[in-house]
Image: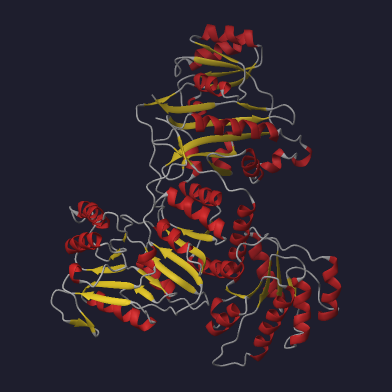
Amino acid sequence: MAVVLGTERAPPRSLDRLIRPRSIAVFGGKEAHRVIEQCDRTGFSGQIWPVHPREEEILGRRCYRSVAKLPEAPDAAFVGVNRALTIDIIRELSARGAGGAICYASGFREAASELFDGTDLQEALVAAAGDMPIVGPNCYGFINMLDGALLWPDQHGMQRVARGVAVLTQSSNIACNISMQKRGLPLAYVMTAGNQAQTGLSDLACAVVEDPRVTAVGLHVEGFDSIEALERLAERARELHKPVVTLKVGKSEAAKLATISHTASLAGNDRVSSALLARLGIGRVDTLPELLETLKLLHLHGPLGSADISSMSCSGGEASLMADAGVKRRVNFRPLREDQRQPLKESLGEMVAIANPLDYHTFVWGNREKQTTAFIAMMRGGYALNLIVLDFPRLDRCDAADWVTTCEAVIDAAKTTGAAAGIVASLGENMPEETALSLMGAGVVPFFGIDEALAAAEVAAAIGAAWARPAAPPLMAAAVPDGEAVTLTEAEAKAELARAGIAVPPGRTAKSPTQAADAAEVLGFPVVLKGLGIAHKTEAGAVRLDLTSRDQVLAAAEAMALVAPGFLVEKMVAKPVAEVIVGAMRDAVAGPVLTIGAGGILVELLDDTAILTLPTTEEAIREAIHGLKISRLMGGYRGAPKADVASLVRVVAAVASYVVANAAKLDELEINPIMVLPDGYGAVAADALIRRRK
């Protein structure tokens, strides 16, 4: 079975007519009524055609008896009837040449455990649609507030916008919740995907990203529908400079493999998802509030040029909160430049300690001119994002005039400097919606929460860094191999690796204790003795290190013969600076991936790993190694020698090439440990496991 690079499925159906319709047909009872109501409330200017077998009119509009009786093929249809009738209507719409349909009914594949025919009905639905796009089934539909087109049978909290972000989710209830947000985020589209029987979430995202009025895309993802579509989305987002950010939840789609190595458990399918998204330049957040706050930043300012940020507040407590929150984020409160210090001291006074984060006290509170001068001095520091912490008082009980003054000073400073700025309410409820909307209109991000603001900065900076690099090549796609799985002996595995250019210790196999002792004398002492045909040798007592004589080897081999049918005798590797694990496993979504991390007996204790999707580069490998905790040890910790990291990079690159070349039959690969020797002395694969198909 050959390895295929960057395979593409059939070209996607155009969703333009469906998501930006000029005519809408609605089928059903109360749900159809609601769709018409929502379109009327938002001022949809196109045609709406109700279809009903008995009603003469719905909400003042003439009813048609069937698809065939419609004036023309509708651009979009909302099909809110039972599951069996849905299939018939979809078939008729497809034959008429409709632009697409939302399938509202449930009882398809999502109910297969309760309904014996659920899967069959879903397949029949897809067949009935043919070339016509359908979204669902078990789907609420979508809201398009750019054109006022809602194929949506429920309430929502959105308003018409001229431009904004698109948020897509598999969950109809999450979509409802997002539509009710009061954070000042301009929502252009909110879409649901339901069962994704034919059209997936990534397909929908690819369609909305092409709308020139969309600035950024947010995805709430339970499971990736199509890697090809996700790659296509990432590529187009980069080309159009419209960032994508995801909230990936739920257990991974990866197949449950019976593993005999550490690699699969170390990789963790959620980590594979993160590596995949990072490769594609797609941001990832952990919570729904982080998703919305990040989208606000991306809507106004796009990806950030760095992770350098500044923070100002009129409280030392708030400055401490900001500094502490930054510890767990990949953001950098870079120290102020010398040319900032004097202007800040002149505007704030000698009693203010000039630092970042900066507590500017209350000496300039309520003074727009002095606040503006101070904010300008900070914003001229070259930071990618400048934050000012400001919690508003309750507007129903307090006077917020001085807080408004501070907002005006921030807006003035941002306009003067052209810097990206945000106002952060440490408690989200302390940012009034009208204030958030006003700040967004002025180009200043209103952040609800310190953690959320820093998450947004971290993600926007990560996307910026990814876009600054050349785009990664398409992921390697290889079908899951057929045939019986076979585990090579360590000697066979090392022979394979040696042919791939990976250094292994000199060694010989032996069938008896005497042959093992003879082999040791030929190799020269000290040696290592290992039992062949045993997966976890240490636990089985099938490894003996640093044997220095024939008698020691003979005695060890005789004891080991009780559990091992044969032996591997190897030259003892010199003491390493560090031990590293490199493994490969097959993820059902991302394909073959590499794990690299702290190895040896520390492999599971430290849980210090990075994931590399394939194909990869030496630059990506070097960056992954640098991000490990163990990299400090390899850098010459506390006077110890530095490790030969360059050789380690070459070894990992050779492993990656081996995996790519053998992906069609490889199940698992693990080298644990790679002994990373002092600088200039190389890196040696001390133990290896390969499991592949016949």
**Residue 125, position as x, y percentages in the image:** 23, 56
281 is higher (above) or lower (below) than 521: below
Say which quadrant the C terminus sits in. Answer: top left
Count of number-bearing discs:
0
**Residue 525, position as x, y percentages in the image:** 66, 13
In front here: 664 or 604?
664
Q: In which quarter of the image is residue 195?
A: bottom left
Say which quadrant the N terminus sits in. Answer: top left
Colour style of the rendered protein structure: secondary structure
Q: Residue at (51%, 33%) from the top-left corner?
A: 660
529 is higher (above) or lower (below) than 60: above
Q: Quadrant of residue 359?
A: bottom right
Q: Which residue lies furthest to the left in this view?
A: 54
Can residue 607 be seen?
no
Image-based side of 458 in relation to 351, left or right? left
Image-based side of 563 in relation to 282, left or right? left
Can residue 550 be seen?
yes
In front here: 49 or 620?
49
**Residue 138, position as x, y percentages in the image:** 28, 63
In front here: 557 or 578?
578
Q: Residue at (46%, 52%) from the top-left corner?
A: 230
**Residue 656, position as x, y percentages in the image:** 55, 34
305 is higher (above) or lower (below) than 547: below
Image-based side of 619 in relation to 448, left or right? right
In front here: 352 or 192?
192
